[in-house]
């Protein structure tokens, strides 16, 4: 890519300026020595005193994945002024392991737990939307080092989600097809394919808002994790392990979050992966227009192992 480009989202009214800086690498957002060693007082370790909601047992009487109550929730079911529910998914009993260092089978089990908790929270009285997400690294909002993700049940449909839902509905009215199924078709042979197998397509989207951003799109039209078969979830786990591992090699913080369908909409679920090397500044906050210094074509090359990453503008 020689010149900068303003790019529009596939089907939403969202814009990105792709602006590669020649030879510049995004800043490492992880600092060496950042992660403290297993603290005796880490409440996410097996000995921690916590309110357990759900344990996925291992074979020796312990657990592989644990769900606990958020200790300082912003929302709770007994507060009608800030109604909702927050849970924490502890991804492994091992304090030292990050998610991409776990086995594919283990990551698949984390997905099973996400699905289990999602289905149970979405059925709660007064809950309109449930978001499953992960913050990894201080700049992505992580405050505890033990690998974990979060689930928040909200009493409203958040504005960003509502916009997306409306855009998908409009697209379906106009094209008589699902936008994500169409993206799968149209991007099949594009230079933006980061990873794929029989079940999962990992795409660096055309108007990527994040350097090295990826959408994990199930190839079959499923509306939630609960709709996915065991094989499909195993593929997603494999894709996540590869993509997250590559971004960890670059030392970048990241977030990921599921775009789940609501109610009977039957929209195509995707998992969005958002590395966060940059702090958004005035332009981003004031206009919603994002500058991304890593063209998605370069990001995909990096994930396919054809480049070292960070180096752009070639
Ligand atoms: Zn711990
Ligand atoms: Zn961490
Ligand atoms: Zn679809």
Image (cartoon, rainbow, N blue to C red):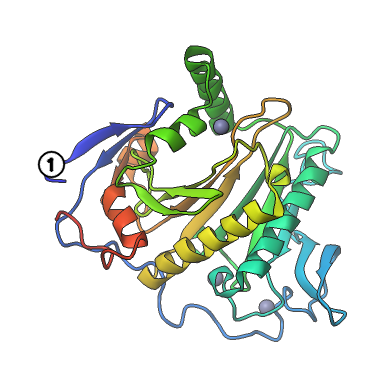
Q: Residue furthest top?
A: 174
Residue 295 spot, x, y in % from top left: 27, 48
Counting from the top left corner in percent of width and height, residue 217 is at 52, 44
In the image, residue 82 above or below residue 140: above
- The quadrant in which the C terminus is found is bottom left
| Residue at position x 85%, y 65% in the image | 51
According to the image, label 1 marks what residue?
3
Q: Secondary structure at mark 1?
A: loop
Q: Nearer the viewer, residue 68 or 311?
A: 311
The crowding category of the residue bearing disc 1, from other C-alpha atoms within 10 Å (few below 14, some 14 to 19, many at least 20), is few
Quarter containing ligand 1?
A: bottom right
Left/right placement of residue 65 relative to residue 197 reads right
With respect to residue 82, does 263 lie above or below? above
Residue lying at 57% horizontally and 29% vertically, measured from the top left: 159
Residue at x 48% of width, y 13% of height: 174
Residue 110 visible, this orientation: yes
Whether the residue under disc 1 has CB within 8 Å of ligand 3:
no
In the current view of this chain or complex, which residue is farthest to the left? Answer: 2
Provide residue 130's location: percent of width, then percent of height.
70, 41
Q: Is residue 100 left or right of residue 20?
A: right
184 vs 260, left or right, is: left
The location of residue 164, given as percent across then percent down, is: 53, 28
Identify the residue at image location x=77%, y=67%.
66
Residue 294 shows up from this direction: no
Name the one closer to the observer, 54 or 269. 269
Looking at the image, how many numbered discs can be counted on the residues?
A: 1
194 or 118, nearer to the observer: 194
Determine the image quadrant of residue 253: bottom left
């Amino acid at each position: 890519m020689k010149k900068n480009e303003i790019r529009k989202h596939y089907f939403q009214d969202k814009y990105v300026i792709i602006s590669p800086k020649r030879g510049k690498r995004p800043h490492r957002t992880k600092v060496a020595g950042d992660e403290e060693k297993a603290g005796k007082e880490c409440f996410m370790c097996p000995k921690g005193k916590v309110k357990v909601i759900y344990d996925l047992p291992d074979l020796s009487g312990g657990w592989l994945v644990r769900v606990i109550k958020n200790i300082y929730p912003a929302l709770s079911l007994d507060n009608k002024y800030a109604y909702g529910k927050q849970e924490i998914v502890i991804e492994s009993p091992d304090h030292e392991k990050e998610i991409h260092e776990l086995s594919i089978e283990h990551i698949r089990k984390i997905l099973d737990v996400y699905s289990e908790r999602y289905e149970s929270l979405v059925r709660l009285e007064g809950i309109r939307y449930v978001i499953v997400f992960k913050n990894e690294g201080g700049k992505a909002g992580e405050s505890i080092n033990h690998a974990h993700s979060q689930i928040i049940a909200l009493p409203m449909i958040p504005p960003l989600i509502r916009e997306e839902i409306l855009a998908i509905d409009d697209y379906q009215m106009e094209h008589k097809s699902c936008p994500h199924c169409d993206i799968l078709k149209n991007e099949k042979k594009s230079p933006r394919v980061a990873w794929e197998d029989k079940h999962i397509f990992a795409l660096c989207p055309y108007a990527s808002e994040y350097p090295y951003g990826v959408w994990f799109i199930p190839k079959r039209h499923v509306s939630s994790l609960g709709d996915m078969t065991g094989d499909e979830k195993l593929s997603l786990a494999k894709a996540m392990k590869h993509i997250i591992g590559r971004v960890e090699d670059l030392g970048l913080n990241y977030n990921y979050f599921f775009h789940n369908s609501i109610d009977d909409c039957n929209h195509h679920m995707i998992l969005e992966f958002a590395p966060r090397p940059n702090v958004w500044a005035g332009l981003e906050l004031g206009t919603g227009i994002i500058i991304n210094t890593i063209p998605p074509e370069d990001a995909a090359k990096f994930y396919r192992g054809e480049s070292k990453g960070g180096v752009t503008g070639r």
